Image (cartoon, rainbow, N blue to C red):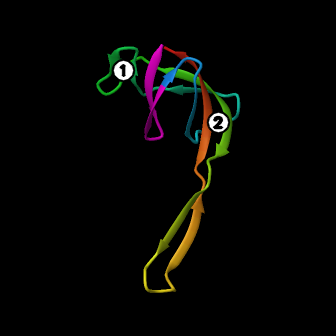
Amino acid sequence: MKAVIKTGGKQYYVEEGSIIYVEKLNGAIGDKVTFEEVLMKDNTIGNPTIKDASVEGVILKHGKGSKIKIFKYKPNTTSTRKKQGHRQPYTKVEIKKIG
C-alpha cells in the first residue's frame, strides 16, 4: 500500500515500513501516531482528503537537523552584519499501517 499524507505543512509519500522525518510531533518515543489527512491512497485521490482513511506510525526518535547558517549584511557599511544559525527540530516516524 502507498499513500500521500500531510503533516506539518508538508506532504510525504509513504509505504508500509518506510521511515520518514517530519516536523516535531508531541509524544514520547514508542507512542503511536495517527495521520488523518490522507491525500492519496493507492490510486485513489481525495478531494482534498480521503474520508475514513488514516496512516498509523510509531515515533522512533526526536532530534534536531543539521545547522543552517544565516548571514545578513548591507554593503559599504561595517555596522550591519549579522550571522546566526538554526537547527530545525524533527521527529523520526516509522509507518506501520495504511488503512
Is label 1 in a helix, a strand or a loop? Answer: loop
In this figure, which residue is indicated by the disc labeled 2?
Answer: 27
Question: Which sits earlier in the primary sequence, circle 2 or circle 1?
Answer: 2
- Residue range (magenta): 1-13
Give me the C-alpha separation between circle 2 and circle 1: 25 Å
Magenta span has 63? no
Determine the main secondary structure of the stretch shown in magenta: strand
Q: Position of residue 19 (x, y in %)?
A: 59, 27
The residue located at (61%, 30%) in the rendering is: 93
Report crowding for label 2: few under 14, some 14 to 19, many 20 or more residues within 10 A (C-alpha). few
In this figure, which residue is indicated by the disc labeled 1?
Answer: 50
Left or right of residue 79: residue 74? left
The residue under label 2 is which amino acid type? Gly
Q: Position of residue 37 (x, y in %)?
A: 42, 28
Q: Nearer the viewer, residue 30 or 68?
A: 68
Left or right of residue 82: residue 76? left
The residue located at (37%, 19%) in the rendering is: 51
Q: Is residue 91 above or below residue 58?
A: below
